[in-house]
Amino acid sequence: MDQRLERILPRVQKPARYTGGEYNAVIKDRAEIDIRFALCFPDTYEIGMSNLGCRILYGVMNREPDIWCERSFAPWGDMEEEMRKAEIPLYALESGDPLAQFDAIGFSLGYEMAYSNVLNMLDLAGLPLRSADRPGLTPLVLAGGTCCYNPEPLAPFMDLFVLGEGEEVTLEYLQLLKQAKNEGWDKARFLRQASHIPGIYVPSLYDVTYHEDGTVAAVTPKYEDVPARVTKRIIQDMDKSYFPVKTIIPSTEIVHDRVMLELFRGCIRAAVSARLDMYTGRCGTELRICWPSMASRRWRTPAIAR
């Protein structure tokens, strides 16, 4: 642990938020890793560690031998103040390495109130906020989660967005990033190729026009090979979908301090107001069951008409 960090931890609330070292946290040898991914949750440790989606993606990436996914959370105000005073950049819990040293930095966006925390975390990491001011291939800055269906508020700051469920597409764009690193691609070439992956939206490859009231009028690709419409990703076979069975045990109490089991995805009542249904593509359609023993059962719910 950084000696500067050791000095400031006694002065902040809940220092266990910032130490890492939890049971089942994944540690890998840097020399054997091709891609380092910082999975960032733009809120406190207690909230981020309660997020099942982050736990799933953490396991999906870390079961790959050439990828090391680590975690980072937004520090509370007292810790942020101490970090800025001591000039400690935002770091990952597993290794303690600054986020600027990673190949990719991914934010999980579940609610709009966290947008300012995203920018604050980039600033704490010592990275330029806008994508245009980060010309290098790495660190790639991206976001996924339900809020990404309205990506434009954060479009100037993200290199790409992931739309839909991330278990499969995450590995696809990370393998492309690995290829880009090995073959010496620049950022522009990588983003152009990444836009061909279903579920990937690259803001810099589109022109966005607005109505007088500020709403989006049109999103137009700049190049012929860039898709005019980005298709969200949906896991089609839940029997083959990854679910963590060896999950991290937090060192301090978290908001949902319990084991989580995913029984199904979507709303059984087909509520049109449920954002998760829009995200997973199951509102008013077939409900996907996550237990193999129930896979043969067909679950359908009627769409709600308005």
Image (spheres, helix red, strand yellow):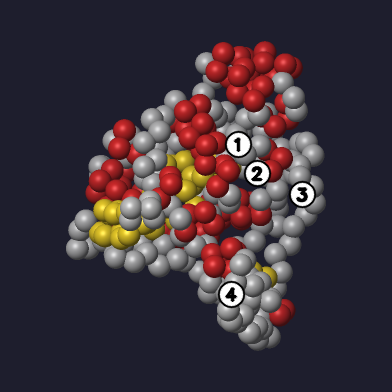
Question: Left or right: 300 with respect to 99?
Answer: right
- Residue for point 38% across, 51% down: 214
Closer to the camera in the image, 270 or 239: 270
Amino acid, disc 3:
His
- Residue for point 59% across, 63% down: 275
> Which SS class for mark 3?
loop
Q: Is residue 225 above or below residue 147?
A: below
Amino acid, disc 2:
Gly
Whether residue 136 appears in this view of the structure is no
| Contact (Cβ within 8 Å) of mark 3 with mark 1 | no
> Which SS class for mark 4?
loop
Mark 3 → mark 4, Cα distance in angstroms: 26 Å
Mark 2 → mark 1, Cα distance in angstroms: 7 Å
> Which SS class for mark 2?
helix
Amino acid, disc 4:
Cys
Mark 3 or mark 4, whichever is nearer to me: 4
Question: Left or right: 302 with respect to 69?
Answer: right
> Percent x, y for residue 225?
22, 63
Per the image, the residue denoted by label 2 is: 48
Dot 2 or dot 4: first in sequence order is 2
Mark 3 → mark 1, Cα distance in angstroms: 16 Å
Q: Quadrant of residue 241?
A: bottom right
Dot 2 or dot 1: first in sequence order is 2
| Contact (Cβ within 8 Å) of mark 2 with mark 1 | yes
> Which SS class for mark 1?
strand
Per the image, the residue denoted by label 4 is: 283
Amino acid, disc 1:
Phe
Per the image, the residue denoted by label 1 is: 73
Q: Quadrant of residue 254?
A: top right
Per the image, the residue denoted by label 3 is: 256
Question: Left or right: 55 with respect to 170?
Answer: right
